[in-house]
Image (cartoon, helix red, strand yellow):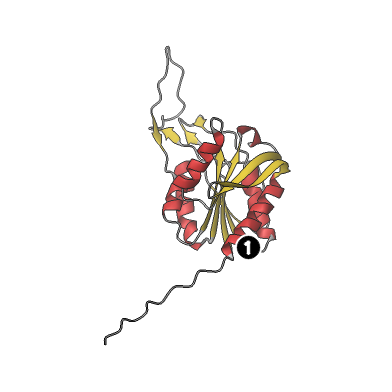
């Protein structure tokens, strides 16, 4: 099986030195890439800026911005049988980038932000026979928001977690499929969560395809 994984944050630069980003460490995505490789799969890992060494035997692609990640995913997804989207892609970027370093000035500074590409939604709309796993990091009304994401993005699994898992080695998480919680993790290592996800994907990938009915020819008598 060919597995595509995304990991880490994106950075949306305001000027030469400042950017909008988040605290994602990339650990979950790197764990998924390692687990898939250990299971014998061919793995491509697309990651934002993280301080992690690429897993052995994995094709590693490093990007910075959401637009760059979008471009890299589009280039790789056609060859993927399964996609695991753990990356914390920024939803907004500055409408323009200041030349050089923006200097302080009296009074407030107003930034105009524009949307970045919704990579996961695009993948869901063109999923075909691929297996698609998304992560939902939620705070308010967490379960409802995760299930909403599952439906809107046309996912096969959604993994609900919280902001405190960003830089941690262990995590609490709940995995949902078709509106039902199928697995809950408490203080599990990210490697353990990743290994379970790979097994779950393998189980879906090996499902027998329902036989197609052949229309019975109409009688001409």
Image quadrant holding the C terminus, namely bottom left
**For this rendering, which residue is in front, 121 or 55?**
121
Where is residue 143 drawn, in percent x and y?
Answer: 56, 38
Note whether residue 42 is visible.
Answer: no
The residue at the far front in this view is 221
Q: Which SS class for mark 1?
A: loop
Residue pictured at 39% horizontal, 34% vertical: 114
Q: In which quadrant will I find the N terminus? A: bottom right
Q: Position of residue 105 (x, y in %)?
A: 43, 15
Query: Who's the residue at 45% across and 54% down the image?
Result: 74
At which x and y percent is residue 25?
A: 63, 39
Would residue 134 be seen by someone viewing this image from the given angle?
Answer: yes
| Quarter residue 163 falls in | top right
Considering every residue shown, the one lying at the far top of the view is 106
**Residue depicted at x 57% and y 63%:** 205
Position of residue 27 in the picture relative to residue 81 (left or right): right
Q: What residue does disc 1 label?
A: 41
């Amino acid at each position: 099986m060919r597995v595509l994984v995304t990991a880490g944050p994106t950075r949306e630069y305001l000027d030469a030195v400042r950017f909008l980003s988040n605290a994602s460490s990339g650990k979950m995505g790197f764990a998924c890439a390692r687990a898939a490789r250990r299971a014998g799969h061919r793995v491509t890992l697309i990651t934002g800026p993280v301080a992690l060494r690429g897993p052995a035997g994995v094709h590693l692609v490093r990007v910075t911005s959401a637009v760059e990640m979008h471009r890299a995913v589009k280039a790789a997804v056609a060859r993927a049988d399964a996609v695991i989207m753990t990356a914390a892609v920024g939803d907004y970027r500055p409408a323009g980038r200041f030349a050089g370093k923006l200097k302080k000035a009296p009074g407030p500074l107003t930034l105009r932000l524009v949307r970045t590409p919704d990579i996961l939604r695009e993948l869901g709309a063109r999923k075909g026979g691929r297996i698609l796993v998304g992560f939902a990091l939620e705070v308010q009304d967490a379960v409802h928001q995760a299930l909403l994401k599952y439906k809107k993005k046309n996912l096969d699994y959604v993994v609900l977690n919280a902001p405190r898992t960003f830089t941690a080695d262990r995590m609490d998480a709940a995995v949902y499929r078709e509106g039902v919680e199928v697995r809950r993790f408490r203080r599990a290592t990210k490697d353990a969560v990743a290994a379970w996800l790979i097994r779950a994907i393998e189980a879906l990938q090996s499902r027998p395809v329902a036989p197609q009915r052949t229309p019975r020819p109409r009688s001409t008598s």
